[in-house]
Amino acid sequence: MTQTIAPRVRTLVLLILAVAGALLAGAAPASAHAALTGSDPAQGAVVDTAPTRVSLTFSEPVAVGDDSVRVLDPKGERVDKGDPANPSGTTYSVPLVSGLPDGTYTVAYQVVSADSHPVAGAFTFSIGAPSETTVSVSAQASDDGLVGWLYGFGRYVSYAGFAVLAGGAAFVLACWAPGARVRAVQRLVVSGWLALTAATLGLLMLRGSYTTSGRVGDIFDLELLGDVLQTKTGAALVSRLLLLAAAALFIAVLFGAYARTADAAPDHPGDGDGGEPDKRDLTFGLALGGTVVAAGLAASWAMSEHASQGLQAGVAMPVDVVHLLAVAAWLGGLTALLVALHRAPVETPVGHDAVRRFSRLAFGSVVTLAVTGVYQSWRQLGSWSAFTDTRYGQLLLVKIALVAVMVAVAFLSRRWTRRLADARGSAAAEKAERAEEEKQPAGTAPATASETSEAGKTEAGHDAVRAAQLARQRAATEAARQKRLRDADPNRFGLRRSVLAEAGVAVVLLAVTTVLTQTEPGRTEQDARAAAATSSSAPATGQGSGAVSLTMPFDTGGTNGKGVVSVDLDPAQAGDNALHVYVEGPDGTPVDVPEVKIALTLAAQDIGPLPVTPDRITTGHWSASGVQIPMAGDWKVEVTVRTSDIDQVTVSKNAQIG
């Protein structure tokens, strides 16, 4: 046995180390999720003379293509010429045709940030004076349609497949060696490998359309696929496929040679193996090789996404690898435990020792997740306010809450584990099994005689259909017997229910994590806001300033429901504005009302309503600062005034902004 296993182990480890070393050697750090921080002409600016080019400045270097930046005239026709150039740092510019007439022009951009995510947007500027335009600035980005949905689903499947593959294998090696002989566990790990492989191939095909046009027909464009292979994300996906080939060899040895050496009675490699050198060598080789493969697969995410960009990328990438491995060990191992509790045959039960080992493994994973998660949160958020002010921070809060729920349910599982250990070999379980054995001969004697008769007929070629029916009945009877025996122990049944609850929360947690990896980090979002506010506060060439004041009477229909509401917007330009609301009674004195809300809508461009909730300053006076108006135009200003719990009314007026 030693002579046949040892060469396999050496071959497996050497192959895995060679592939992983070659792939990870090229994982160099770059710069977080890109955001537009400035432009020339500025957003909403009105310039006196036509510019010769349009420049865009991002928070980090981005990848641009031929159509990454488009400039459209008021009729929707392109007026840019040539490919985007990168004159310096993070600034990209496109030249414009000469002799542009007065009017409002739309700049649409679609680039790929260094952390692999497409970034799209649009803004307008005007030459001479604003005008009507037929261009919609709310066009769908490439990642918003069917292709974007498919890409997001593929990312979810890939994360789930990795967790099941790596965590399921770790559960077998570290917690329950006889699981290598259980068909349900084998199918689970193989399913994880198949899911990750299929998702990786799908992401590779979808990537080109996802970052460019967003059209379904471009999924099979070989030219786009060739372009993807030249990118960092394409290289990471190809690396993942090569590592999955090594993972296939690992699975073959785990469920082949290792399963044959695993004793059916003990539930851990070290229990009752007699110290056989071949088994210890095989276990060590699989543990080492599996860890290297799993780390390589995790690195294929770390080397191409958030961890590889921004602050301390050299530290963040290894931390991200450790974080993903801890996620896989916890969630994937939990899935394997759930399958084992529900599907393991009675002859190979999941003992309390195996559950206790997994409990320790899960605890270590949770501690690791906490430490690495704190570092990642600090790196991606940068401030406490980003938790509530940015979408990334809000999603992170949801993720933290889900982890807390899982940990709480895990404590219930630990209680059931202790009860299972205390009740090992309890009289109730033994009585149920004896009753099942005593009932079986009497209850199945007629069926056995019938089966013997029908088997004879089958052998004679007279009743093959009946034999097949009897075979299915025998299988169903055996499955029912196995389930009754598994359910006979109330402690084991309680453990199964608590583990099932953990797994249900894990499914939602994995979905939130997938969305989180596609969301702009809070630090980047806040930096972009600050840069945009600074840019908008500086007056643009030829841009005027002023304020808009709107006065609207209202009547909510209730007691003291009549009055006048005034809205002041300063400087009434595209960009950052200050808003003041004044409420007066019929006699002109300031009055307080329970609630005042504002909504801004630009119907011509299908923008809005943009909600604004001002803060109360003093009696009859509300204010809001930093009100962002994306572009100039004829905006509808709606004011909702509530004078009691049930009495409210919405009044509106139009105002020319910009």
Image (tube, rainbow, N blue to C red):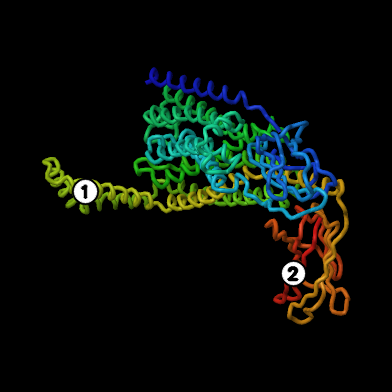
Judging depth in this view, the residue of 437 and 533 nearest the camera is: 533
- The residue carrying mark 2 is 640
Residue type at tag 2? Thr
User: Which quadrant of the figure contains the C terminus?
Assistant: bottom right
In this rendering, is residue 491 above or below 255?
below
Q: Nearer the viewer, mark 2 or mark 1?
A: 2
Q: Disc 2 vs disc 1: Cβ atoms closer than 8 Å?
A: no
Checking the image for residue 285, the label placed there is none
Q: Earlier in the sequence, mark 2 or mark 1?
A: 1
Tag 1, which secondary structure?
A: helix
Q: Is residue 620 visible?
A: yes
Checking the image for residue 470, the label placed there is 1
Q: Is residue 358 visible?
A: no
Judging depth in this view, the residue of 67 and 276 nearest the camera is: 67
Residue that appears at 14% across and 46% down: 463
Residue that appears at 58% across and 52% down: 405
User: Which quadrant of the figure contains the N terminus?
Assistant: top left
In this rendering, is residue 613 above or below 412?
below
Judging depth in this view, the residue of 295 and 652 nearest the camera is: 652
Residue type at tag 1? Leu
Residue 559 percent location from the top left of the image: 76, 82
Residue that appears at 75% across and 63% down: 636
Q: CA distance from mark 2 to mark 1?
A: 73 Å
Residue 195 percent location from the top left of the image: 47, 39
In this rendering, is residue 432 above or below 367?
below
Callout 2 crowding tier (Cα within 10 Å): few <14, some 14–19, many ≥20: some
Left or right of 172 in this view: 445 = left
